[in-house]
Image (cartoon, grey):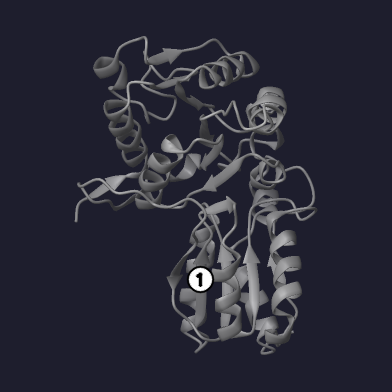
Amino acid sequence: MREILFRQALREAMEEEMRRDERVFLMGEEVAEYNGAYKVSQGMLDEFGERRVIDTPITELGFAGIGVGAAQNGLRPIIEFMTWNFAVLALDPILNTASKMLAMSGGQLGCPIVFRGPNGSAGQLGAQHSTAFESFYANIPGLKVISVSNPYDAKGLLKSAIRDDDPVIFMESEVMYSDTGEVPEEEYLIPIGKAIVKRQGKDVTIVSFNKMMKVALGAAEELSKEGIEAEVIDLRTIRPLDWMTILESVKKTNRLVIVEEQWPMCSVSSEIGYRIQKEGFDYLDAPIRRITSADAPMHYAPNLAKLYLPTIEKTVKLVKEVMYVEK
């Protein structure tokens, strides 16, 4: 199977859906003439023209609102944010219109729109460019939230998101756009709301998503050298969340560690921890543990950034604690 870049997988998903359905279009900052801030949309202006690949001013509230209006009038927009850190300006049309319109209209008016872009930290970018937003949007009824970790999932889930009749939040990572991975040449879709077991194990379950999957899988590899076999689950979709895949794994391993880039308060791991103790308490041989970013804004200094984020070393240590082999 061929290997392609993460950004190419996203581009192919958009191109294939735009060829399939003329209602689909892409809009955002620098997506056309500049070929995308991260070159995700490279060459798309040449193929689809300026009516379907649309550059916007630096006005997230404005072009997100235009996209919502277009979706309510029969089109299927893809709205690219240069970063989800900037998309807080667009929260009003996302929260107050896109997510609520189907309910407010009694099922008569939907909003088939995809909001996508990089999420979370990307090195020394400081506090205002380093927030992870999965739990922010997963808290909103009416939205679907996808957060991908590799090119294969990125393409298959973005195609599903574009075809979905509900508003979808699609989260990538700036530091993964140059990652490579196997992606079939033939068309495929990945269902929204289905997690995947990326590594089989019997001793402990590690759950993660987005670029923190590198931490989870790296920790599992290190643990295996010491005879601890971790089962690693990639959530892929945050809302709706695939509870059963997590629960079935915990039934086997009896231990759960969650790794995420969010702040700890009211995070994705908070919800997973609550749900699994509620439905799987009798299977647990140790308390559920989690690793999150520090409960503080991310600093620019590299030593503080390292302390702020989850790491392989922190994950290995925590797994050993739930295995009762280290205190």
Say which of 284 and 98 sits in front: 98
Q: Which residue is depicted at the point 37% across and 38% down?
A: 10
Q: Position of residue 278 (x, y in %)?
A: 76, 73
Q: Amino acid at mark 1?
A: Val
Q: Can residue 132 be spotted in the picture?
A: no
| Residue drawn where x is 75% and y is 60% of the image | 270
Relative to 288, residue 62 above or below: above
Q: Quadrant of residue 256?
A: bottom right
Task: Give the answer, above or below, for where 219 lies relative to 124.
Answer: below
User: Which residue is under mark 1?
Assistant: 232
Residue 228 placed where, x, y %? 53, 86
Q: Toward which corner of the image does residue 85 lie, by quadrant?
A: top right
The quarter of the picture where the C terminus appears is: bottom right
Secondary structure beneath dot 1 equals strand
* The N terminus lies in quadrant: bottom left
Residue at 29% over, 36% down: 12
- Placement of 55 over or under 241, stated as above or below: above
Label 1 crowding class (10 Å Cα cut-off): few <14, some 14-19, many 20+? Answer: many
In the image, is 134 to the left or to the right of 201?
A: right
Answer with left or right where residue 82 lies relative to residue 38.
Answer: right
Give coordinates of residue 61: x percent, y percent. 65, 17
Give the tally of numbered discs. 1
Residue 77 image point, x, y percent = 47, 24
